[in-house]
Amino acid sequence: MFLRRRNPNGGVYYVLNNGREKNITPKHDDADLFNISGLLLNLDALDQRGVRDYSEEDEQALAQTWSDTQRHRDVRRTIRSMQHHVELSRTASLKLLNQATHPMRVMNHDLLSVALRGPGGELGMRVYEDAKVKDENGRFIVRGLTQQRCLQHHGLPAAAVRSRLEVTQADARSKEIRQLINMGDPRKASDYMVDLRYRLGLPEHTTRDDERFLRWLSLHQSNIAFARKDKKAVQKLEVCKALKSQMLDHTGLKRRNLVNIRRMIFQITDPGVFTTNLKGNVATEGDHAMLPTSGERDDMHNVPLMLRNAVASVLDACGDLALHYEVLTFVNNLHVRFPDKPAMAMCKYGLRLRALAGVGLLDLARQQLQRYPKGIPPVVWAHGDAVEDVGAAIGLWNAHIVKNNIVRTPASRRALLTIATGYNADGKTIYEAYHDLMLRKSNRVEVEGRLDAYMNFVELLGHLGAVRTLWYSWRVAQEMQDRLNEQWRATGQPAESITDEYQIALAHALQQGESEAEDFQDSTLEACARADFISMEGRSDVSPGGHDTPRAVWIKEMSLSEFEELMALPLAQWLQNLNRGAFLGT
């Protein structure tokens, strides 16, 4: 007879009833008595005659007493499988308990996602099976179970439909965007279910039907919440370290890294997981101590900055179209969760610039730049990484021009020139376009980083054929290069030149076709951009490589010193020399 006991930590253990307690009724509801006669030896009998330890020979002898039948092999295989799953479950549970920012904690979002996947009723049972569960003898089949795609025929929720319409109706590429959305629709594949079950350490049979999986997730969430109810809330440093770990991952699973980042951020704002949320861990208006200017120690306490860096590192490593759409969805969700949080402004603004450019949504990119008619809020420029995001967005537009047909038409190229410079044929339409953002005054933005972003802008002008705007930008870039060279000379570094990059960009611009606009002599950015905008109206679709015109050949054959002398000329004389070069190159 054994008596059930519970230690101060809540653990259960059993003691041998020595006979003195056999007539004693347990005082607690969780205590009970039971018989295990014939199954256990009295531990006091060790080291006595006829009693020895169980050995490997005993195990082999016991195995030989079993007849080698298919049923016995199935039982042994089932036992090994159970042992394996128990070990996985224990390991996963320990990680969840010991790591406050583990990305795989069950959130209310997971419960809702699983609940929405199945159609419900009898149709929802065993939607992930493609084989029989039991054999002809009624025994469960261990092998042969795989994950089948969940087929559903009802529509998306109303909020998801509105989100889809916002993206697809704002751009002429609606068919392509719809296909991109469907790629990320969790109803189209079971990867979400399989990955969630595996990373939580749940056994395979939990995903045999949606209702069972939902019950397991609910139980798992309750157990973890109960185990951590007396522990401290997550601190900024813990969140920053967890986000930084996703930047240092070299396994190549960059898409999973983004999933981990999204889960970490939203789980610390989920009231079903933690008692506090991210609002207590980021800077508030007037709390500038939370927005450090530099330094590793400060950065490791700045959650929005570390979040931006983590997502940007994933995009830099694996920036395909679908991944940028996932980032766009993530940033939109961040805005819904933190609509009026100044500290998140830089993170949301910069990442959305990248994501819209990565997907190629010209109309939405223009709308984002037009959202602030009085200029971008200063808090966006609290850190210099925002300029890096602008440069990365322009680089993505350059890649679109070279690799696909997103911005090959004259209309799309004119729209891209507008969001790059802020001007169209009618004048100023965007208060702070890409050009303005890169030149925005901020002591947190290094000259080198600003110049790198600006050279992406120069390359874009070359792809668009914006000849006059290239002439104007030469003076801006040359001023930044001179300041950078002064800093480098002070440290003994050799000076560099941007002449060769401008020579390539101008030759490329001249390959797009001859200008059909009037020769405007005004040398302001507005006049140059408007003239280039008008000159694009007469062009047909062009290839990214263009074709060699006499002026383009003449520019390519120039030496660097000759090109610098040409670019230093006033606009009217510069245009005359370009036209004269058309005859010299023939």
Image: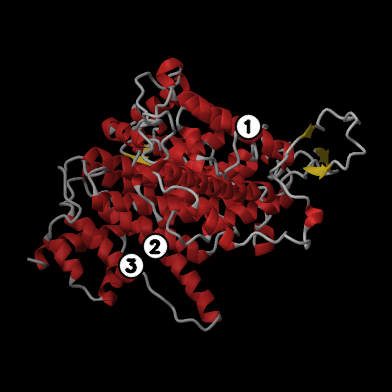
Residue 113 in the image: above or below residue 89: above
Residue 236 in the image: above or below residue 580: above
* Colour convention: secondary structure
Label 3: few (<14), some (14–19) or many (≥20) C-alpha neighbours in 10 Å: few
Q: Distance between the Cα atoms at labels 1 and 3?
A: 72 Å
The amino acid sitting under disc 3 is Ala
Q: Distance between the Cα atoms at labels 2 and 1?
A: 65 Å
Residue 357 in the image: above or below residue 272: below
The N terminus - image quarter: top right
- Quarter of the image where one finds residue 4: top right
For the residues carrying marks 2 and 3, which lies nearer the camera in this image? 2
Which residue is label 1 attached to? 219
- N-terminal of the two: label 1 or label 3? 1
For the residues carrying marks 1 and 3, which lies nearer the camera in this image? 1
The amino acid sitting under disc 1 is Leu
Which residue is label 3 attached to? 568
The amino acid sitting under disc 2 is Arg
Q: Position of residue 110 (x, y in %)?
A: 54, 33
Which residue is label 2 attached to? 475
Q: Residue furthest left?
A: 586
* Position of residue 287 in the picture relative to residue 471 (left or right): right
Helix, strand or loop at label 3? It is loop
